[in-house]
Amino acid sequence: MKAGLRVIKFGGSLEHSGALKLCLDRAAGFYREGSVWVPGGGNFAEEVRLAQQRWRFDDITAHAMALLAMQQMAWLMNSMYRDYVLADSIIEIVRQLDLGKPVIWAPDVNELNEAGVPASWEVTSDSLAAWLAVRLDADELILIKSAEIPQTADLNKLAELGIVDRAFPGFTGNARFKISVVNKDKF
């Protein structure tokens, strides 16, 4: 793989705020080569949360369904950027990057389960993006959010404020890559 690999996570709230397309356009313009896009679950994940409240199914089921929500968002993103390749595994991501293709990750539940990623709402697409960045030995992880990001907040404070998920600091604790959490208007 080439140096300069960036994992860029697009918060699900960008869909709600109407900023998703603009943020995708910016990312495609600035970081096309050597990039892996990670979708949040957006409205699809919210439906999973509501269904879990209604039907009371376990977190393992909710986790699998939330990953399907991320996959749906990946397909949505791919519909706007057909030259980006959908990939569901680390092996396929690496193969596509080696071919010089930009990638959109549509995570596979089996790969994450085999890696021991916890099935919990404390582990959202934020932590999954960090997990992926570690596995790919990325140079940078960028999380694009709708929320305002306090300038002086570290990752623990961002987790405490609910800007990133609670598990995120643990997934990035030994990260060797740069981590940026940015507001959609400042990206």
Image (spheres, grey):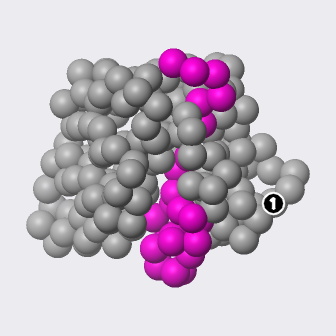
SS for dot 1 = loop
Name the residue nearer the viewer: 106 or 121: 106
Residue 113 left/right relative to 82:
left
Badge 1 amino acid: Pro
Percent x, y of residue 42: 39, 67
Q: Is 79 located above or below residue 9 in the figure?
A: below
Q: Residue at x 37, y 30 (%)?
A: 96
Q: Which residues are magenta?
A: 1-25
Which quarter of the figure is the C terminus placed in? bottom right
Q: Residue at x 34, y 72 (%)?
A: 43
Residue located beneath label 1 in the image: 150
Q: Residue at x 45, y 64 (%)?
A: 12
Percent x, y of residue 124: 42, 48
Percent x, y of residue 164: 58, 52
Q: Residue at x 71, y 45 (%)?
A: 180
Residue 10 left/right relative to 157:
left
